[in-house]
Structures are given as C-alpha cells and as structure tokens.
Amino acid sequence: MSTGHYLLALVAAVIATSLTDWYFMGVLFHDRYLVYPDTWRHSGGGKGESLAVAWSTLLSVVTCAVFIWLSADLGVLAWGPVLELAAGIWLLGPVPIFVTNGFFIKIHPLNTLAMCLGWLAKLSITAVCAHLFLG
C-alpha cells in the first residue's frame, strides 16, 4: 500500500462521508430532533455546538483512516469482501449501539434510523474509496 494512494483514499472518504453525515445526522428527519429538545446538549447552536461538530469530524477522519488501513492490511479490497467488511462492522458497532440507545434515551425512532443509515453510508463509502484507490 503506497502512502499516496492511502492518503487519496482517506481524503476522498472524509470529504464524501462528511456530506453524508451532514445529510443523515443533520438534515434527514431534522424536525424529529425537536420532539425531545432536552435530550440535545447544544440545541441553540453557538460555540458548544461548533466544538461538538469539530470533535465529531475528527472522529470521522479516524474512522475512515482505520477502516482503510484495516481493509488494506487484511487484503480485503475487492468489491465483495470490502463491502462485506463494511456491513459486518456496521452490524457489530453502530447498529447495536444506536438501537440500544434508542431504547433508553429520549430520541425519535426516525433519528435512530437516520443515524444507523448514516453509519452504513459512511462505512460503505469508505469501503468504495479503499477499493478504488488501493484495490
């Protein structure tokens, strides 16, 4: 794996997934977040929300970087295997966490669905970038 190709895959994944994160976690079912305004720490915007978005973006970069590295290290860069890896990680991590949180935290079910779909999109896009740039 060349560093240049790895960085290209990472940059492409981060740009694309930041757009899908914005759509799934910010736009899709946005009005449903207002059903439980007391659940959200920074509902009015401002400095606190900007800091939360910055940390979330940094974590997204780490997610993409680790996924691309893992898929290359395991040699799972063909279409089928890399997408299976993305689906497996999605089913092992984000889905159980968000669904379980949905049982115990006041959050609209459509927001839980949006977060799950957002993570599926994030992992799938990162898998596609890994395949295209490293496969």
Image (cartoon, rainbow, N blue to C red):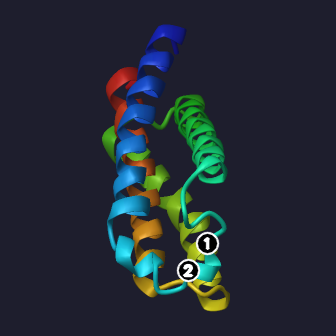
Determine whether, in the image, residue 68 is placed left or right of residue 126.
right
Q: How crowded is mark 2: few (under 14 residues within 10 Å), some or many (20 or more)?
A: some
Disc 2 residue type (three-letter): Pro
Secondary structure at badge 2 equals helix
Residue 44 vertical placement versus 63 (above, below): below
Q: Which residue is drawn at 47% across and 38% down?
A: 76
Determine whether, in the image, residue 2 is placed left or right of residue 52.
left
In contact (CB < 8 Å): disc 1 and disc 2: yes
Disc 1 residue type (three-letter): Trp
Secondary structure at badge 1 equals loop
Picture coordinates of residue 50, whole percent (x, y): 59, 46
Picture coordinates of residue 56, whole percent (x, y): 60, 47
Q: What mark, if any, has residue 37 been given in the picture?
A: 2
Which is more toward the observer, 83 or 17?
17
Disc 1: which residue = 40
Q: Which residue is drawn at 66% across and 67% down?
A: 41
Which is more toward the observer, 29 or 86?
29
Q: Residue at x 48, y 26 (%)?
A: 10
